[in-house]
Every structure is written in structure tokens, then in C-alpha cells.
Amino acid sequence: MRWVGRVRSPIGTALVAGVLVVLTGCSSVPQASAPPVAASQPAGRLTLEQANDVTVMAIGLVGTPYRYGGNTPASGFDCSGLIGYVYKQRASVVAPRSTAGLIDWGASIPAPSLRTGDLVVFAQNGRATHAGIYVGEGRFVHAPSTGGTVRLDSLKSTYWAKQQVSYRRP
């Protein structure tokens, strides 16, 4: 697995280490890598390996500064820029550049089917307002707001639990 990105905090370092230990246990027999997913490939076709790569990279970007319109670690990220960067780098998939595009991207999945690498898309009045990458155990990585940094949050936190959310599998 090729690592791209930097961990910018002790918490991020611990999370990446924990995820790597868990993911290492997922496969005891070496397997050939799946071919990259083309942007035109039908939704919901990411392999489990690609979804895990997306998750590890997203966690590794925790601490990167937020910047409206940003889409690289060097320039910072907004929420859709973070998603686009991670999916392009780790799964060779081109994601829509706006939250409006993400709300219909991929396949809709029910909450019980949520797995690492899936998207969480928040909406108000039927309009997408924010998005992140699900990383397991009810948590997601996202670029929340001006002045902040990419961070890991719980879907069950007071704020996020009140939001209308849909789940998408690219």
C-alpha cells in the first residue's frame, strides 16, 4: 500500500496506526490489486481494498487546514475537495466537485450497510450542505469550516446526529 499524505497530530498518528493494524488483519493471503475504477464505471463498484485505502488516506489528512475551494494537502481542503482528492489518489475515481453533485453520486445505501470508504452527505431542506468519508465505528473525516482543519467526528455527536444524512457508495 502506497502512503500519500501526512499525519499532522498525535491523535491522527494513533488513528492511522490503529486503522493499519485492523486493516492488516483483514487479509492473511496476499491478493492481486484490483484495476483502478474508471470515473464512468457504475456506482458502488469500489473494491474493499480501495475503500480501505480511501479510509486510511482520509484519516492521514486529519489536521490539514480548511480552505474554501481547496483540493490538495498543500492548499488545504473544503469538504468536496477532500473527497475528490482522496478518491482520485486512492481509487482512481473522479468525484463531483460540489456537495450538490455528491448527493446523487454513487449508489444510495441504507445505514446498516455503511462501510469504511462510503460517503456521508448532509442536507437541509433537500439541499446538500456538507459531506465526509465514513471511516468506521460511527465516525467520519471531513473538512468542516473556515478557520478549522480536516478532522474526525462522530455521526452521533450532538450536532451531527441532528442533521439529515444520506449514505452513498461510490
Image: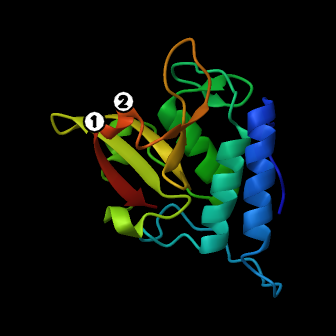
Q: Amino acid at mark 2?
A: Tyr
- The residue that disc 2 covers is 159
Q: Give the x, y percent position of residue 10.
A: 81, 32
Element assignment for label 2? helix
81, 169: nearer the viewer: 169
Query: In the displayed structure, does residue 140 sit left or right of residue 104?
Result: right
Quarter of image, res 157? top left
159, 101: nearer the viewer: 159
Q: Amino acid at mark 1?
A: Lys
- The residue that disc 1 covers is 162
Determine contact: label 1, label 2, CB under 8 Å.
yes
Instruction: Give the image's coloring scheme.
Output: rainbow
Q: Give the x, y percent position of residue 30.
A: 83, 84
Query: In the displayed structure, does residue 83 sit left or right of residue 162?
Result: right
Cα–Cα span, label 1 and label 2: 6 Å
At label 1, counting other C-alpha atoms closer than 10 Å, the crowd grade (few under 14, some 14-19, many 20 or more) is few
Q: Give the x, y percent position of residue 159.
A: 36, 29
